[in-house]
Image (spheres, rainbow, N blue to C red):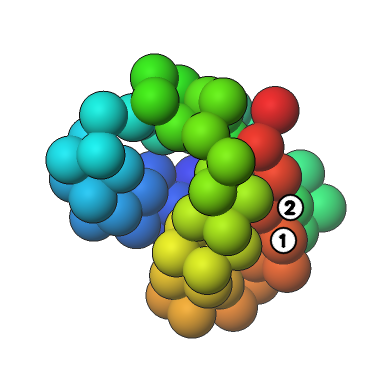
Amino acid sequence: MIDKIKEVIETIKPFIVNDGGDITFNRFENGVVYVSLQGACKHCPMANETLTNLIEQTIITEIPEVIKVINE
């Protein structure tokens, strides 16, 4: 499961990096993926939208066992 999550994150990463940010996988527990947004994304006012509309939506679509993504 963790390898699948990391693979999906790697497909999203170029979009995040292109805007001056980065994303790292922290852990997976009880259906929740924990990530850290870094760089420009760390304090961006659009970070929550990016997390929900891009990251969470993509991961949940690819991996139905995931129910939520949280930025730590």
**Would you name the residue on which mark 1 appears?**
68
**Would you name the residue on which mark 2 appears?**
32
Query: Residue type at mark 1?
Result: Lys
Q: Position of residue 58 (x, y in %)?
A: 44, 70
- Residue at 39%, 25% in the rendered image: 40
Does residue 33 sit above or below 56 in this rendering? above
Foreground of the two, 39 or 35: 39
Q: How busy is the neighbourhood of tag 1: few (under 14 within 10 Å), some, or many (20 plus)?
A: some
Rendering quarter of residue 16: top left
Q: Position of residue 62 (x, y in %)?
A: 43, 75
Q: Position of residue 31 (x, y in %)?
A: 75, 59
On screen, residue 25 versus residue 72, left or right, reads left
Q: How busy is the neighbourhood of tag 2: few (under 14 within 10 Å), some, or many (20 plus)?
A: some
Q: Position of residue 24 (x, y in %)?
A: 44, 29
Does residue 38 sit above or below 70 in this rendering? above
Foreground of the two, 41 or 65: 41
Rendering quarter of residue 64: bottom right
On screen, residue 31 versus residue 47, left or right, reads right
Which secondary structure lies at badge 2? strand
**Disc with the residue nearer the chain's start (2 vs 1):** 2
Q: Residue furthest front?
A: 45
- Residue at 66%, 37% in the rendered image: 71
Do residues under tags 2 and 1 come within 8 Å of each other at their CB atoms? yes
Report the label total: 2
- Residue at 58%, 41% in the rendered image: 45
Query: Residue type at mark 2?
Result: Val
- Residue at 48%, 80% in the rendered image: 61
